[in-house]
Amino acid sequence: MAHNRHRANTHLLVLTAATIAALATAALGSSTAEHADSSPLPLTSITLFRSGVGYFERNGTIAPGDEVQLRFANDQINDMLKSMVILDEQQALQSVTYDSKEPLTRQLASFGVDLADNPSLAVILGRLRGTNVKIVTADGPLSGVILGGESREQAQGNAQKTITVPFLNVLTSTGIRSVNLATLVSVQLESETLNGELNKALAALASHTADRFKTVDLAFGGKGPRAVKVAYVNEMPIWKTSYRLVLPDGATASEKPLIQGWAIVENTTDDDWTGVQLALVASQPVSFQMDLSEPLHIDRMTVDVPMVAGAAPRIYQDGDAFAANKKLRAMATAAPAAPSAAPMRRKAGANDAAGEFGGAGGGGGMAGRAESDAFSGDPESLGLRFRSLGEAMEGSSVAGGGEVGESFQYKLKDPISIARQQSAMLPILTSPIEGRRVSIFNRADGISHPMRGVEIKNSSGLQLIPGPIAVFDGSSYAGDAEIGYLTLNDTRLLAYAVDLAVSAAVTDESSNTVRSIAIVDGLVEQTHKQVNTLSFAFVNKDETRERTLLVEVAKQQEWQLAAPAKPAQETSSLYRFEVTLPEGESGTLVVTQERTALQHLAVVGYDMPTLLHYASNGVASAEVVAAIKRAGELQGVINATTAQIARLEQERQAIDGDQNRIRQNMSSISHDTDVYRRYLAKFDEQESRLEAIRTEDAHLRTLLTTQQEALGAYIRGLRVS
């Protein structure tokens, strides 16, 4: 009975989903009927990508003289210009035209009143210097000609703070008046021309704000009707997926979970999608935006106008004096001619004929070659390209699945209809899928219960795109899960609820043991074995159903799994172990990870009691103990010599201090006193001792160097195990 009840509930859910989908499609179809696409090139195919773009195809029959109008939002026109392809079997497309507008800032800058930079009133009036105006202020009216504007600092409040106040200087019949613009009530331009320019600039602003769409006109020529395809890419919201997973109640082991997939699609275009073939592609092609619709102007250099130097006045000598003076005659013959005002002309040659600077002949030749390249090939080859573009999107459940290039796509078998500015949830998958119930425990979750879950294998025949999954246990809602990208026959765990019927406890133990000691290259090398043990205890309080428990344990970097010998599953960052908990019973799991670590210590200074303890436990050999002991003895000799040098240094410093005291005392007493002579004798005795200290210190330092070299030579090549 449980089995039959489950199957009835399951089919009820499927039929309900199918009914909803059918009703939704019918409703959408009826809503779009009144907006049916009457264009000779109706929208027939759409492919949506998960990178935020959509590929649109329009197909229809065109007769000579037909014009097709397509509407695009302003923010879509650039994608159209970048991607539109038009395939006409007769190659008779005459033109593709659309409204082109100057950039708004350039339009505004061209008017008599420049509003391009959103100027303030003070700036606008300052730009109208020389204009006759009528001004009304709080102090009364005045008329005159604008001289210009300025800003003044004025005290505010208690004069500790100043503000900048704009003023307008106006030439009136009684002189120059400065108008505080803060007191301005109105300004009237007396020039009708400037008033008209201001109105035109404001109209351009309003038009730019209100103009949300552009119309693209396609004009066709040719002979007789024929098929035409127009395709383009537009920005679109990414399509999304959501799933429903129905778990069997477990009465029959052969029953499989049932998965349903839905695609969420938004029509944000200005066109109704009526009877459109829809494909949903999982790839993310590279797509970018480029401003191709707005006219662009480049800055050109300003070149000075070529000018010919004016002729200088000349004073001529009389004829007799000039003829008699050969030197002057020779100078006159060698004088340069006055420069010519005629511009230099470049002699036409072969380069000119080839159109090096864009001559008429050259330009025509280039245009002819470009046209030939663009439409080369016979009509049959064009038809082949025309047909292959449509075949490129052919795919292979409610939706078919297939590969497009290196991408996977869902292609809905039946056409869909979605009204403009509306969204739809479309079924793309209904299929049994391989899976089993599991409980998943990971102590990193921070709770003492595992998660209820399911392990599924994607045997649906279609790839699954990331999205949420609503899980139903039999006929009841059980919880939500989330799935990543799941390719064919891939396996994934889903967790949808806390399994309160199973409790868990974890204990953690660690140990660090020195396993061996050796001397390598003059260093004590200690080999440590580090062991970490996790002990899990589980209790299944469910008296009616056993649990298959998957226990997740994080991998420790550079550690090896010691027990159990092999996990049930392994990922890049964790192990999974499987534990079966019968109804109402408990179970345990012990997971041990270990690693071997090396620690290097100096031979000299190694703690001998610790070393002897390791030797007694067999960790360190007698040879290692002897070598470390010998190094300690050599270091002891060095330490003794170092201590002697330190004692001599202390004695020297004490003598220096005493001599300073004696010098001070001797400077204050007479030289012929007994005290002075006693100080002098002691000073002499200390000088003798200082000489002896210097000699002994030099000897000890030489000895210390020899001892240190001996210890270094002993340790340097020491290898004992």
Image (cartoon, rainbow, N blue to C red):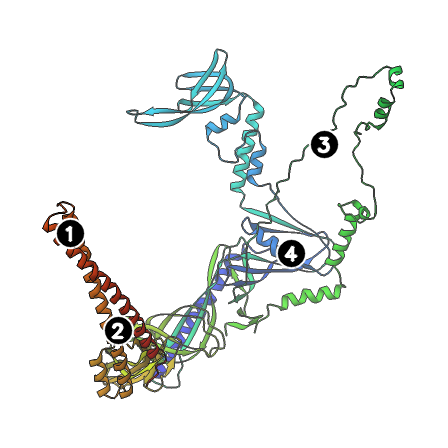
- Closer to viewer: mark 1 or mark 3: 1
Which kind of residue does numbered mark 1 sit on? Answer: Ile
Neighbourhood count class around disc 3 (C-alpha, 10 Å): few under 14, some 14–19, many 20 upward: few
- Front residue of 277/618: it is 618
On the image, numbered disc 2 is attached to which residue? Answer: 638
- Front residue of 627/54: it is 627
- In the image, residue 542 lies at what x, y percent? 24, 81
Q: How far apart are the alpha carbons under marks 2 and 1?
A: 36 Å
Name which residue lies at 54% across and 32% down: 114
On the image, numbered disc 4 is attached to which residue? Answer: 40
On the image, numbered disc 3 is attached to which residue? Answer: 306
On the image, numbered disc 1 is attached to which residue? Answer: 662
Neighbourhood count class around disc 2 (C-alpha, 10 Å): few under 14, some 14–19, many 20 upward: some
| Disc nearer the start of the sequence (4/3) | 4
Neighbourhood count class around disc 4 (C-alpha, 10 Å): few under 14, some 14–19, many 20 upward: some
Residue 257 visible to the viewer: yes
| Disc nearer the start of the sequence (4/1) | 4
- Closer to viewer: mark 3 or mark 2: 2
- Closer to viewer: mark 2 or mark 4: 2
